[in-house]
Image: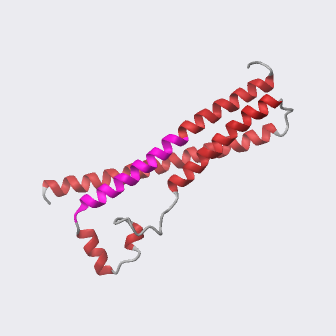
Amino acid sequence: MSATDANLTAAHAEVKAEITRTDTKTALLLAFVGAVLAGTWTVARDVSLTTAAVVVGGLGLVLLLAAAGLLLHSVRPNLGCRRERFGFPLWATLTPEEIGAAVARDLTADIAGLSRLAVAKFTGLRRAVDLTLTGGALLVAAALITAGGAL
């Protein structure tokens, strides 16, 4: 194996590992957002809330729901996309001989496609983190309003 082939193989593995890390972070954040939504609902239904707390907390919940939507979109399988020239969806439609030819082709196209996928997933994750932070801050503000301690 030449140095170029080894570098391409390493780059391919690195991009796949980055996709895995992003999907893991996404799953953890989705579980956290779900727990916050469930906990907020449990607490809010048993507490008498002021109008200001309802408005601020409601906005926080909307942002958390938007974050959950982004996270789900980020990990949503795209099995129907025939544009992609790499990975599982394509392989599922090929014969064994065609799979051999597809695997033997230049890795650069595969690395480029997977890199675009990784960037899209990472961007969605970053936006969901921003929404989660903002939504959480609004929920804290709503809790403070309800407690009568701030705002």
Q: Residue at x 70, y 26 (%)?
A: 141
Q: Residue at x 24, y 56 (%)?
A: 9
In the picture, the quarter occupied by the N terminus is bottom left
Q: Residue at x 43, y 48 (%)?
A: 21
Q: Name the image quarter holding residue 43.
A: top right
Q: Residue at x 25, y 52 (%)?
A: 10
Query: Residue 136 in the image: x percent, y percent?
Result: 64, 33
Mostly what secondary structure, the magenta segment?
helix
Query: Residue 114 in the image: x percent, y percent?
Result: 35, 56
Q: Is residue 131 left or right of residue 91?
A: right
Q: Residue furthest left?
A: 2
User: Is 107 or 54 nearer to us in this picture?
Assistant: 54
Q: Is residue 138 left or right of residue 99?
A: right
Q: Name the image quarter holding residue 142.
A: top right
Q: Report the span colored magenta.
A: 106-128
In the picture, the quarter occupied by the C terminus is top right
Q: Is residue 23 left or right of residue 113?
A: right
